[in-house]
Image (cartoon, rainbow, N blue to C red):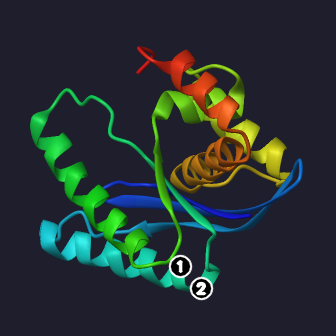
Amino acid sequence: MIAFGIDPGSHRTGWGVILAEGGRMSTMGCGVIHADSDAPLSDRVATIFAGLRAELERHHPDHVFLESMFHHKSARSALVLGHARGVALLAARLTAAPIDELSPAEVKKAVTGTGRAEKVQVQEMVRIILGLRERAEVDASDALAVAIAGAQRARSPILSLTMRSATRGTR
């Protein structure tokens, strides 16, 4: 399975692609789409959409996984992030691949064993799981973690139910 993970953000959107074969996973690519923080929101979401669209077309994923929304302290930040998530969902929908969303806690639990892991723990476990020489950039690493968790969920419906129930309330 080719799993494409997306970690949406209004300034930096991470993407990561893995190949999951049996119990093995390997990286096919990852990166960060940088949107100019001084640009209007309409320009930033256009940049995110174009970047994701190009990577999705290049990698032809079997499944696309997107990190779901988490609680923000600021309503404005949540609204802006919602726009970035919207264009990410649209770019994904334009592929033939199914789309699923995973909570941040579910992703952390799948990769590190705990739904409350710190970013550096997630980065290091992504490096180990995928056999990378060094840690990927934070947003790219987060997207790879989403792809890893999504591939695990897709392979095991029972694991999916267990992970979802175990991560409730840990956001």
Q: Residue placed at 33% from the left, 75% from the top? A: 49
Label 1 – label 2 distance at C-alpha:
5 Å
Q: Which residue is mark 2?
A: 58
Say which of 127 and 157 sits in front.
157
Q: Is residue 121 visible?
A: no
Callout 1–callout 2 Cβ contact below 8 Å: yes
Mark 2 secondary-structure assignment: helix
The answer to whether residue 120 is left or right of residue 78 is right
Q: Amino acid at mark 1?
A: Glu
Q: Quadrant of the C terminus?
A: top left
| Mark 2 surroundings within 10 Å by alpha-carbon count, few (fewer than 14), some (14 through 19), many (20 or more) | few
Picture coordinates of residue 24 (x, y %)?
89, 52
Q: Quadrant of the N terminus?
A: bottom right
The dot on residue 55 is: 1
Mark 1 secondary-structure assignment: helix
Q: Is residue 101 above or below residue 115?
A: below
Q: Is residue 75 above or below residue 109?
A: below
Picture coordinates of residue 169 (x, y %)?
41, 14
Picture coordinates of residue 91 (x, y %)?
37, 74
